[in-house]
Image (cartoon, helix red, strand yellow):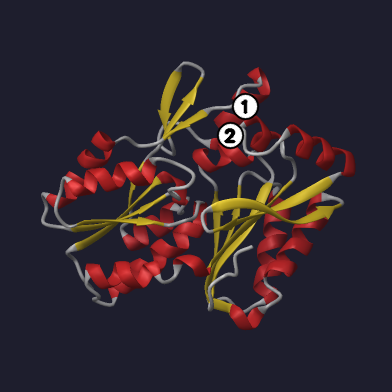
Amino acid sequence: MNDNIVITSDSTTDLTDELKERYNIKVLPLGITLGDKVYRDGIDINPDDIYAHQEKTGELPKTTATNVGECIEFFEEFVKQGKTVIHFSLCSKMSSTYNNACIAASELENVYVIDTQNLSTGAGLLIISAAEMVKSGMNAKTVVEETNKLIDKVDTSFVLSSLEYLHKGGRCSALSVLGANLLKLKPCIEVKDGVMGVGKKYRGRYSDVVKQYVLDRIEDADDICLDRVFVTHSGCDMQLMEETIELVKNTLPFKEVFFARAGCTISSHCGPNTMGILFIRKTPIVKD
């Protein structure tokens, strides 16, 4: 194991406490503005606080990228210990977090910043892969190079029960919301090349939709890396969550099935009752 490398990320990667402890991942929280107060994602605010505030006031929070100064202070703690930092950032096309981290890294030595081109546990999959490389004794430069080769193989998607939060956050049009509501559609959102787009559109009860969505995503077993998979949600019915995990386990023999809750930044945009299945493919994903 290479003890001179520390892996860090911003809070949008949604790794569980168990995984952060297992791989010694250090996290830099984004800011969450609710009302007139700024909170730290995952530290002094949680997604249920956001949902309660939205239900009471109709107001969605504002998410704030980590600024350059915050990034420098965060990285310096490890650099002063003689560590090399490999930092994973929310997709550069979705936030200025990545660019700010890069500027901070340029002021220091031995800090690498990876644009995950992803969000939530899609980026988390890259972190775990990198952590396993570090564990094997690989040097930092090679870890970064090999991790970058995995980015376009990460399959990230989630199915929504409502477009309300995406609409209020300015990420889909009122016409799309109206159409989805009238037709009672539950859209699958896919992340490709760092951009969110609409995939298959489902209709019916959300619990039935989730089950069909899972089967659709992992039906091409020959192209799926079976090391690990994330089932990630933003606050769903417990029975549905348990049934989804069992469905994944019974469909493909993944070595590890991780269950994660989306943090405040991701939940602020997708809202409650969102479920995703995220994994790595053996070949790059074809972009539309």
- Whole-percent x, y for residue 239 in the image: 73, 53
Local crowd size for mark 2, using a 10 Å CA cut-off: few (<14), some (14–19), many (≥20): some
Q: Which residue is mark 1?
A: 52
- Whole-percent x, y for residue 202 in the image: 81, 55
Q: Which residue is mark 2?
A: 48
Which element carries disc 2, helix, strand or loop? helix
Q: Residue at x 49, y 55 (%)?
A: 118
For the C terminus, the image quarter is: bottom right
Q: Residue at x 74, y 69 (%)?
A: 215
Q: Quadrant of residue 180?
A: top right
- Whole-percent x, y for residue 43 in the image: 40, 36
Q: Residue at x 50, y 52 (%)?
A: 119
Local crowd size for mark 1, using a 10 Å CA cut-off: few (<14), some (14–19), many (≥20): few
Q: Residue at x 61, y 45 (%)?
A: 234
How many numbered marks appear? 2
| 213 relative to 196 in the view: left or right | right
Q: Are marks 1 and 2 in contact (CB under 8 Å)?
A: yes
Amino acid type of the residue that numbered disc 1 sits on in the rendered structure: Ala
Residue 128 position (above or below residue 17): below
| 209 relative to 14 in the view: left or right | right
Which element carries disc 1, helix, strand or loop? helix
User: Between residues 199 and 131, which one lies in front from this camera angle?
Assistant: 199
Amino acid type of the residue that numbered disc 2 sits on in the rendered structure: Asp
Separation of marks 1 and 2 at Cα, in angstroms: 6 Å
Residue 265 position (above or below residue 256): above
